[in-house]
Image (tube, rainbow, N blue to C red):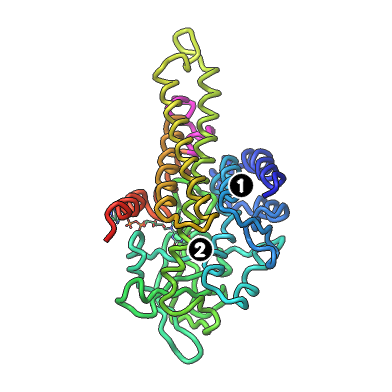
C-alpha cells in the first residue's frame, strides 16, 4: 500500500468525517455526501481488485490500517463507505468471472450503489446455520421466501447478497448465496430500525415473498454458501477489530486531553491515579488488541489459517474499544454524558462491535473450540 492511501484516509477522517459525525448521529440522516466524497478519493473500493476498477490493495493488514484511520474519524460513516466492499466479499469468494464483472465495477464507480449482505433473520442470529429463508428450485431459477432482520443498508439496498437454504433442515449444508436486486418481484425493503448507536448507518429488514431469482444470480453451488460466508467473516472480523481500534483511539486521545486540562482539588485530574491508571489500562488494552489484529491480518496475508486469531482480534479490540470509550465518558464526567460530547457517541458506536459479525460470546466459543478440537 502506498503511504499516500493511508495519508488520504487520515486526512479524510480528520477533515471530512470528524467535523460532521455528531450532527449525523443526531439527525440519523444517511451520509450520502461523505460517501460520494469517499468514492471520489477511491476509499470505497481501495481493497477491490484493479481489474474491476478497485484500488487493488490485497493486504488485509493494509486494509486494517486504512479502516482504523477512517473509524477514528467516524465509525458509522466508515461502515457506510465500506459497505460495498462487504457486499463484494461473498461475490469474490463464491462468484463466477461473469458475476464479478456484473456486480463489482459499479461498486468502484463515482456513485456506488447502496448494497447489503443479508444473513440474520428474526429467528437466527448467532446460529447462522439455522436460517429459514428458503430458496426453492423452479424452472430457470429459484423462488425465495423469508425475512431478514438487522441488515445494514436494508431500506435503501439496490442489491443484496442473500443467504438462504436450498435444503431446509440441513443447516449449514443447505445454505446458498444469491444476489437479489431492487425491483425483483417479491423483494421488499422493510422498516428501518432505530438504534442506540451507529445511527447514520441504517439497519433494517428485508422481505421475500415468492421472489423469483434467475439461476445466474446464485453465487457458487447449492450448499456452498456457508463455507463462503465463514471465509468472508474471518476477514471481516479482522477489519471490524481495526474499526474498534479507531473508535477506542479517538476516545483515549480525547480523554487524555481532557485529563490534562480539567482541574479538580487544585490540580489537573490526570494527577489522580484513579484517572491516569484507568486511561493507562485503556491504552494497554488497545495496544494489545492492535497486536492481535495485525497478527491475524498478517497470517491472512501469508495464506495461513487465521480464523481463531480473527476471533481473538475482534474480541479483544471490541472489548478494548468498549473499555476505552467507557473510560473516556468516566474521565469527562458530566462533560462526557451530554449529547454534544463525542465520547458518549463513541461509547454507543463501540457497543455494536461487540455484537455484530458474531458476538463476543461467539468469539469466545471459537477460541474455546481451538483449545478443545473435536
Ligand atoms: C446495527 C446492526 C447491523 C447489522 N448488520 C447486519 C448485516 O448487514 N447483515 C446481517 O446478516 N446481520 C447484521 N446484523 C446482525 C448481527 O450480526 C447479529 O445481531 C448478531 O450476529 C447476533 O445475533 P442476534 O442479534 O440474533 O443475537 P442472538 O443470537 O439472539 O444472541 C443473543 C445473546 O445470546 C448469546 N448467545 C447466542 N448463542 C450463544 C452460544 N452458542 N454461546 C454463548 N452465547 C450465545 C449471544 O452472545 C447474545 O449475547 C447487524 C446487527 C446490528 C445490531
Image quadrant where residue 42 sits: bottom right
The crowd level at tag 1 (other Cα within 10 Å; few <14, some 14-19, many 20+) is many
| 120 shown above or below 358 | below
* Residue at the top extreme, as displayed: 266
Q: Residue at x 51, y 90 (%)?
A: 140
Residue 292 in percent (x, y) is at 46, 43
What residue range appears in magenta? 329-346
Quadrant of ligand 1 in image: bottom left
The answer to the question of whether label 1 and label 2 lie on touching residues, with beta carbons closer than 8 A, is no
Q: Residue at x 50, y 68 (%)?
A: 189
Q: Residue at x 41, y 17 (%)?
A: 273
- Marks 1 and 2, how far apart at CA: 25 Å
Q: Residue at x 41, y 63 (%)?
A: 149
- Image quadrant containing the C terminus: bottom left
Instruction: From the image, tell me which residue sits under label 2.
Output: 154
What secondary structure is the magenta-colored segment mainly? helix
Amino acid at each position: 500500500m502506498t503511504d499516500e492511501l493511508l495519508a488520504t484516509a487520515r486526512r479524510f477522517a480528520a477533515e471530512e468525517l470528524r467535523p460532521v459525525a455528531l450532527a449525523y448521529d443526531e439527525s440519523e440522516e444517511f451520509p450520502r455526501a461523505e460517501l460520494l466524497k469517499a468514492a471520489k478519493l477511491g476509499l470505497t473500493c481501495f481493497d477491490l481488485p484493479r481489474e474491476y476498477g478497485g484500488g487493488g490493495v490485497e493486504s488485509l493488514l493494509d486494509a486494517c490500517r486504512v479502516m482504523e484511520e477512517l473509524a477514528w474519524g467516524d465509525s458509522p460513516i466508515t461502515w457506510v463507505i465500506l459497505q460495498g466492499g462487504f457486499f463484494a466479499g461473498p461475490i469474490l469468494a463464491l462468484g463466477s468471472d461473469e458475476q464479478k464483472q456484473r456486480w463489482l465495477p459499479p461498486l468502484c464507480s463515482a456513485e456506488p450503489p447502496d448494497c447489503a449482505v443479508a444473513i440474520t433473520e428474526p429467528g437466527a442470529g448467532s446460529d447462522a446455520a439455522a436460517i429459514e429463508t428458503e430458496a426453492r428450485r423452479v424452472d430457470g431459477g429459484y423462488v425465495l421466501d423469508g425475512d431478514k432482520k438487522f441488515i445494514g443498508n436494508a431500506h435503501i439496498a439496490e442489491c443484496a447478497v442473500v443467504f438462504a437454504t436450498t435444503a431446509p433442515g440441513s443447516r449449514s449444508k443447505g445454505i446458498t448465496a444469491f444476489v437479489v436486486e431492487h425491483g425483483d418481484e417479491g423483494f421488499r425493503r422493510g422498516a428501518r430500525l432505530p438504534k442506540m448507536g451507529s445511527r447514520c448507518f441504517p439497519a433494517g429488514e428485508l422481505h421475500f415473498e415468492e421472489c423469483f431469482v434467475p439461476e445466474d444470480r446464485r453465487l457458487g453451488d447449492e450448499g456452498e454458501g456457508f463455507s463462503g460466508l465463514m471465509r468472508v467473516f474471518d476477514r471481516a472480523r479482522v477489519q471490524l477489530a481495526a474499526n474498534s481500534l479507531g473508535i477506542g483511539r479517538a476516545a483515549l486521545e480525547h480523554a487524555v486531553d481532557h485529563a490534562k486540562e480539567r482541574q479538580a482539588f487544585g490540580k489537573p485530574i490526570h494527577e489522580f491515579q484513579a484517572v491516569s491508571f484507568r486511561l493507562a489500562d485503556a491504552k494497554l488494552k488497545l495496544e494489545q488488541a492492535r497486536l492481535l489484529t495485525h497478527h491475524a491480518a498478517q497470517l491472512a496475508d501469508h495464506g495461513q489459517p487465521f480464523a481463531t486469531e480473527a476471533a481473538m482480534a475482534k474480541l479483544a479490540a471490541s472489548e478494548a474499544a468498549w473499555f476505552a470509550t467507557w473510560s473516556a465518558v468516566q474521565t469527562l464526567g458530566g462533560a462526557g454524558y451530554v449529547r454534544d460530547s463525542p465520547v458518549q457517541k463513541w461509547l454507543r458506536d463501540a457497543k455494536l462491535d461487540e455484537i455484530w459479525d458474531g458476538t463476543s460470546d461467539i468469539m469466545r466459543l471459537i477460541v474455546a473450540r481451538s483449545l478443545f478440537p473435536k
